[in-house]
C-alpha cells in the first residue's frame, strides 16, 4: 500500500490531506480535513464507487483517469504517479472523490510509495456538475429548471459547472426524448429551451460536459399551456385607519406569485378591483378565531376565481399554546396578513390547488432522515439522473431541499420551487412520508372559492 500525507495552505487556511493507494496505484481512501472518501476498484483497476457517488468515465482511460489541459488536449492514462521528465503539472479529475473542498479550489497532493519519496507535486481541479431540478436560482427574473415548459415560450435551464474556468463551449445540451429546440444555442451553463409537441408530454434534456462518459445530468420537463386564474382581492382595515396594503404592493406580490406559478403553467389576473372593508373585529381576529374567519369568507361568494382577503399584519405575541398565523386556506377563501411576502401568498394558493404543507421539524420532532444526504427514493420525480447525491450540490442535505419548496410550511423569503412530484418530509401532523407538494399531485388547474 502506498500512502501520502500532505499539509498545504490555500487562501491563508491550512489544510490537511491524506491518501492511500493499493500497489496497482488505485486510490483506497482520500481524506481532506477529516472528511474521508473511500474508493472501490474492480479487477480491471476501474473505480466502481467513490465516496457517496459513482465515478465518471473519462476519455483516455478507466474511471478515475485524469486529463491534462483545460482544453482537454492531452488525456492522461497514467495513474497519480509522476510522468517522466515532468516535475509539476495540472490535472483535472471529474467527480467529488478527491476532496470535499470547494471545487474551484486547487488541491496539492504529494505522496510516497514503497518507502520511496515521490517529490513531484500534482495540482488537481475537481470538476463538479450541479444540475438541480429543485432550486430557487433565477435567470432574468425567472426560476430555472421548472418542471413544466410553456409551449412556444422560453424556458430557462441551468447547470452549474465548477470551476468557473471550465469552458462553456464544452457544455452541450440536447433533447434525448421529446420535442424542442434551443433558439439561443445549445452550449453553455445557461440556455433557453422552447418546447414543442403535445401538452402533457415529457421532454428529457441531457447535458454533456466535455467528453465524460457514463451517467450525465438530465432534466425532465413537461409540456404545458398557460392556465389563467382570476383572483378577487378584499382588504380589511380597522375603522378610521388606512388600508394595510396598497394597489402597488399587491401588484408587486401578484407579479412574484406569477413568477412562481409559471413553473407549472398558471397565471393569475384580477377578476375585480380591490374591495375595501373596515371592521375592527374582522381586522383583529380574522386568523385567530375560526368563526370570524368564516364571516370574512362570506363577504364575497359566487365568484369564478380565488377570493383572497388581506387583514392587518402587525405581529403580536400569541397567547399560550397559540401560533401567530400568516395565512390560512379554506375552500371558501384565503385569508393572509397584508404584511406577508408573496411566497406566503403563493403557498396558500398552492393549498387551493391541492398541495400540502411540508416541514423539517414539528413541535420539536426532527426526523434524522431529513438531515441526511439526498436519496433518490425520497424525491424520485425530481432527480437529475445518476446515483448517490448527484447531480445536486455535493453534501447537500435533504432538509435544505425542503426549505426551497413553495409548500415549505414556515415563513421564508426563499421558498419558491414547485417540484414535479411528491417529496419525502414531515407533514403538518408530524408524520414522515411522501408529501404532495408537486405537479403530479395537482388537484385543480382552475381553483376557485366556493
Image (cartoon, rainbow, N blue to C red):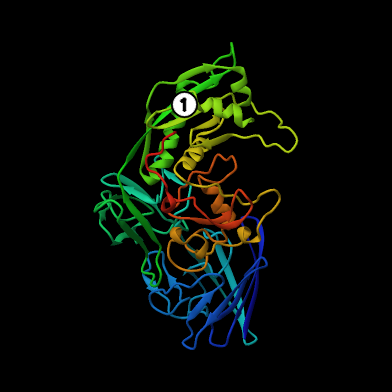
Say if residue 117 shows up in the picture: no
321 relative to 143 in the view: left or right:
right
User: Residue drawn 55% across and 39% down?
Assistant: 413
Q: Position of residue 122 (x, y in %)?
A: 53, 71
- Picture coordinates of residue 263 (x, y %)? 39, 45
- The residue where tag 1 is placed is 250
Q: Circle 1: is it few (<14), some (14-19), or many (20+) Cα within 10 Å? A: some
Residue 210, picture quadrant: bottom left
Please tell me which residue lies in front, 404 or 244. 244
Q: Position of residue 83 (x, y in %)?
A: 48, 79
Question: Which corner quadrant holds the N terminus?
Answer: bottom right
Kindly tell me whether residue 327 is visible in this rendering.
yes
Q: Would residue 1 be found to the left or right of residue 133 on screen?
A: right
Pick the residue in front: 156 or 70: 156
266 or 191, nearer to the observer: 266
Q: How many marks?
A: 1
Residue shown at 60% from the left, 29% from the top: 291
Extreme residue in the top direction: 240
- Rendered residue at 44%/44% (across/down): 138
Q: Quadrant of residue 370?
A: bottom right
Q: Locate residue 306, reporting x and y percent.
A: 43, 32
Which secondary structure lies at badge 1? Answer: helix
Residue 231 appears left or right of 430: left
Frontmost residue, 3 versus 191 = 191
Q: Is residue 91 above or below residue 256?
A: below
Amino acid at each position: 500500500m502506498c500512502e501520502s500525507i500532505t499539509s498545504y495552505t490555500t487562501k491563508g487556511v491550512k489544510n490537511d490531506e491524506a491518501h492511500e493507494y493499493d500497489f496497482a496505484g488505485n486510490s483506497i481512501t482520500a481524506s481532506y480535513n477529516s472528511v474521508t472518501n473511500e474508493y472501490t476498484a474492480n479487477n480491471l483497476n476501474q473505480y466502481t464507487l467513490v465516496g457517496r457517488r459513482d465515478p465518471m468515465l473519462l476519455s483516455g482511460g478507466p474511471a478515475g483517469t485524469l486529463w491534462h489541459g483545460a482544453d482537454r488536449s492531452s488525456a492522461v492514462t497514467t495513474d497519480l504517479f509522476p510522468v517522466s521528465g515532468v516535475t509539476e503539472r495540472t490535472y483535472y479529475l471529474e467527480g467529488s472523490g478527491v476532496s470535499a473542498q470547494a471545487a474551484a479550489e486547487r488541491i496539492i497532493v504529494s505522496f510516497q510509495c514503497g518507502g520511496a519519496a515521490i517529490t513531484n507535486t500534482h495540482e488537481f481541479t475537481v470538476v463538479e456538475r450541479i444540475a438541480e431540478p429543485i432550486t430557487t436560482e433565477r435567470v432574468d427574473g425567472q426560476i430555472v429548471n421548472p418542471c413544466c415548459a410553456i409551449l412556444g415560450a422560453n424556458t430557462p435551464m441551468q447547470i452549474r459547472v465548477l470551476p468557473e474556468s471550465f469552458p462553456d463551449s464544452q457544455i452541450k445540451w440536447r433533447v434525448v426524448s421529446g420535442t424542442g429546440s434551443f433558439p439561443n444555442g445549445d452550449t453553455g451553463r445557461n440556455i433557453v429551451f422552447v418546447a414543442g409537441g403535445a401538452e402533457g408530454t415529457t421532454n428529457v434534456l441531457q447535458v454533456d460536459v466535455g467528453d465524460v462518459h457514463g451517467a450525465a445530468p438530465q432534466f425532465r420537463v413537461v409540456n404545458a399551456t398557460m392556465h389563467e386564474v382570476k383572483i378577487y382581492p378584499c382588504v380589511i382595515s380597522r375603522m378610521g385607519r388606512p388600508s394595510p396594503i396598497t394597489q402597488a404592493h399587491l401588484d408587486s406580490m401578484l407579479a412574484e406569485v406569477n413568477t412562481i406559478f409559471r413553473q407549472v403553467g398558471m397565471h393569475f389576473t384580477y377578476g375585480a378591483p380591490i374591495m375595501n372593508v373596515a371592521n375592527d373585529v374582522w381586522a383583529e381576529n380574522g386568523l385567530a378565531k375560526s368563526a370570524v374567519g368564516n364571516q370574512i369568507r362570506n363577504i364575497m361568494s359566487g365568484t369564478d376565481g380565488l377570493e383572497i382577503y388581506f387583514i392587518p399584519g402587525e405581529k403580536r405575541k400569541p397567547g399560550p399554546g397559540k401560533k401567530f398565523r400568516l395565512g390560512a386556506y379554506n375552500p371558501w377563501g384565503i385569508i393572509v396578513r397584508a404584511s406577508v411576502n408573496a411566497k406566503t401568498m403563493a403557498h396558500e394558493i398552492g393549498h387551493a390547488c391541492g398541495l400540502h404543507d411540508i416541514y423539517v421539524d414539528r413541535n420539536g420532532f426532527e426526523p434524522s432522515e431529513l438531515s441526511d444526504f439526498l436519496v433518490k427514493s425520497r424525491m424520485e420525480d425530481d432527480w437529475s439522473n445518476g446515483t448517490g447525491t448527484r447531480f445536486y450540490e455535493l453534501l447537500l442535505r435533504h432538509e435544505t431541499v425542503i426549505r426551497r419548496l413553495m409548500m415549505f410550511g414556515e415563513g421564508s423569503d426563499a421558498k419558491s420551487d414547485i417540484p414535479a412530484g411528491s417529496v419525502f418530509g414531515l407533514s403538518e401532523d408530524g408524520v414522515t412520508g411522501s408529501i404532495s407538494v408537486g405537479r403530479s399531485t395537482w388537484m385543480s388547474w382552475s381553483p376557485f372559492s366556493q
